[in-house]
Amino acid sequence: MNDAIQRNFTYLAYGLITAWAILIVYALTLAARGRSLTRQLENVKRMLEDQSKK
Amino acid sequence: MRKNILIAGGAIAALLLARNIWVILTQLPDEKFQGAIFRIIFFHVPAAFTCFLCFLASLIAGLAYLKSKKLNYDAFGVSVVEVGLAFGAVNLLTGMIWARIIWGIWWTWDWRLTSMLICWLLYAGYLVLRRAIDEPTERARMSAVMSVLNFSVVPFVFFSIKWFRTQHPQPVLFGEGKMDSGYRAMLYGNWVPILIVAAILIAVRYVQEKQQREIDALRREAHMI
């Protein structure tokens, strides 16, 4: 395989990896945000319960 | 139930994508002049279509919010803009990688590339604007107005290669498109799982936005007690 064809395939791989890396990073960000929101919701609910008991 | 639908959608998208990647890499022949790098089009173009579809959805959500003042439209609007930006980034970066091989450069200030970058930055500005406004109804109103204004750039991006002399390739699907039917089928075929992925991401983001509103409302309630 000559250098030009090899380079062509290498850049195709870069392209595919970049495309999926962006979406995977975004999906991971969403997952982290989801966990954080669940935690915040629990905390606020607990805080409200505590306040109503007082 | 809703979670199961998302998981099933994700599984279907993953299977379709795995099958498509296998066909793209092993079954489809190289394009005569571009060689293997041509295959990037099967992600580059569907990513652009998905991005524009998301921006169109944000326009509709913006108009619906301005008419009805229902915050659900605002939540949907921010969800589609965020996902649209992710696919816009995929489009821009895969295009740059293709350009490096075909044009010998990563970037050129061509009408299509520049307008797409400006469009992407405008929608990124929409997210920045949202962070700057605390009051929910004011934030929703300004976001809706901005999503309507931002969309005016999208037709310009889409038709820039027809209206101006550009380095970017001419349309291969519409008008005088000359793409081979096998390539065309794979391009549309790969758009389906990409759309499913986008729909899943939008659904997850939409639920999170509503959850955030619930948290904000509870916090306000806690402060009032």
Image: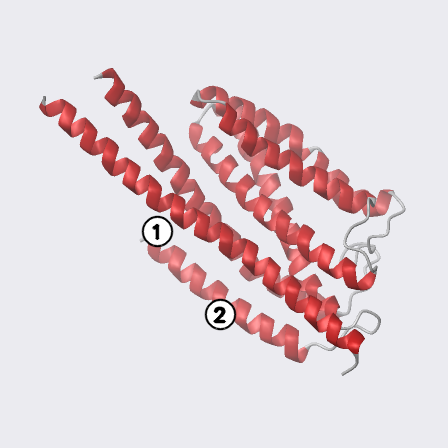
Relative placement, left or right, of B97 versus B124 is right
Q: Which residue is mark 1?
A: B2
Label 2: which secondary element: helix
Q: Where does residue A28 sit, x and y in percent of width and height?
A: 44, 52
> Which of the 4 image quarters holds residue B21?
bottom right
Residue B26 against residue B164 in the figure, above or below:
below
The three-letter amino acid code for the residue at tag 1 is Arg
Most extreme residue toward the bottom is A1
Residue drawn 70% across the image and 66% down it = A11
Relative placement, left or right, of B50 versus A51 is right
Which numbered disc flags the more N-terminal residue, 2 or 1?
1
Relative placement, left or right, of A12 versus B215 is right
Q: Quadrant of the C terminus of chain B?
A: top left
Measure the C-alpha gap from mark 2 to mark 1.
20 Å
The three-letter amino acid code for the residue at tag 2 is Leu
Packing grade of label 2 (10 A; few <14, some 14-19, many >=20) is: few
* Residues indicated by labels 2 and 1 sit on the same polypeptide chain: yes
Relative placement, left or right, of B141 versus B172 is left
Q: Chain of mark 1?
A: B
